[in-house]
Amino acid sequence: MIWDIVRQVFSVLIGIVGLGRLDESEKDLEILVLRKQLDIMKRKQEKPIKATRAEKLTLAVLTTKLKELTKRPASKLGDTIRIFKPETVLGWHRELVRRKWSYKRKSQGGRPRTSKEIDELIVRLAKENSNWGYGKIEGELKKLGYEVPWETVRNVLKRHNIEPAPVRNGSIGWRTVMRHYKEQILACDFFTLETITLRTLYVHFFIEVGTRRVYLAGVTANPTHIWVTQQARQMVWKLDECEEPLRFLIHDNDKLIPDAFDTVFQTEGMRIIPIPYHTPNANAFAERWIRSVRGECLDYILIMNEQHLLRVLREYVEYYNQARPHQGIEQRSPIPYGRPSTNGTIRRRKVLGGIINDYSRVPTSPPLYLN
């Protein structure tokens, strides 16, 4: 299209240059000859002539210019425009003018578009607070140093397909509830292990959901109701040392747990929350610790008997609580080890004979100066 227009304009310029070399009589004679040829062609032409877009553009511009120079109406241009009707050519020009003014223009005014940083912050506030409306988000942004009108907040959320607060505001979900009460929840569970002689041992443990701290209750090959209830009593004594009181206990509906087990904790003011049948994910923190102790410890050791397993688990639990970084609590250990130091020599401590390596810094002693 562009090259066709360039070709048409170039041919018109060549024609103008050629006409400039002729005198008035020669120009009149040439015009008469051209008109006669066009009359003959128009009379013999059976099919209507179709012009290209470039030809329409060129002819429309020239005809409009001729109309302005001669001051003649369209009906008087028939002597000059022979192939097409003058109204048709002028219609082409009007269409070009209409298209010119229908092009999309860049906005010259209005409020500038918000930055990517503010957009991401608005989306974050809306997703993290399902009951916040446009005005609430506007106020929170102002507190953070951003002057953003609520109309802009609405447009940003609409652009990211986020519904208004009354629509997206639903249940806060179990995850949010658990996050609120996690510091008050204690969970317990059993898992089994086969010794080198294929004897089945039962391991009973407790874990604080908030801190991920593990308490090893005991190991036995015969988990009777009396034995399990005794573990509950010993656990209650340990809980007296906790800074934050625990209010809830989660466990499954295992037949190993008698009613007396629940009674021991209920007398201390704790509420028992039994999980549904065949839903280990409802006790996910306990299940995750079982996976950790197996994958990091027990899968690499052949257990001889109860005493052997008890020693192994006590050493692993000590490492787990005091030195092992935990992703679920921002790479801290369940029992905080204090602010890490960048001074001193890095020392490796072998846990369980080197199955696990624990690293820490040993402060460098200042040199001694003798007088």
Image (spheres, rainbow, N blue to C red):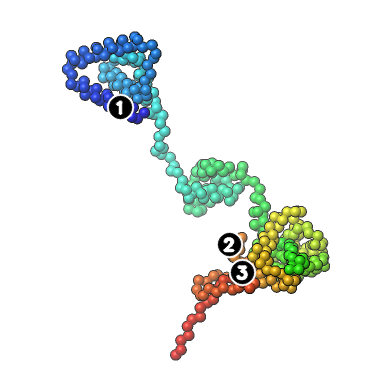
For residue 3, what is the image quadrant?
Answer: top left
Query: Which of the two discs, 2 and 1, sits closer to the camera?
Result: 1
Q: Secondary structure at mark 1?
A: helix
Residue placed under numbered mark 3 in the picture: 356
User: On the picture, is 355 further left or further right than 254?
Assistant: left
Q: Secondary structure at mark 2?
A: loop
Pick whichever, 240 or 280, lies toward us: 280
Identity, as a three-letter code, of the amino acid under mark 2:
Glu
Q: Is residue 263 visible?
A: no
User: The N terminus appears in which quarter of the rendering?
Assistant: top left
Give the alpha-carbon distance from disc 3 to disc 2, as whole Å: 21 Å
Identity, as a three-letter code, of the amino acid under mark 1:
Arg
Residue placed under numbered mark 2 in the picture: 330
| Mark earlier in primary sequence (2, 1) | 1
Residue at (37, 22) in percent of width and height: 52
Above or below, 220 relative to 70? below
Count numbered badges in the picture.
3
Q: Residues within 10 Å of mark 3 (few under 14, many from 20)?
A: some
Q: Residues within 10 Å of mark 1 (few under 14, many from 20)?
A: some
The image shows residue 53 at horizontal and vertical percentages of: 37, 24
Identity, as a three-letter code, of the amino acid under mark 3:
Ile
Above or below, 180 relative to 222? above
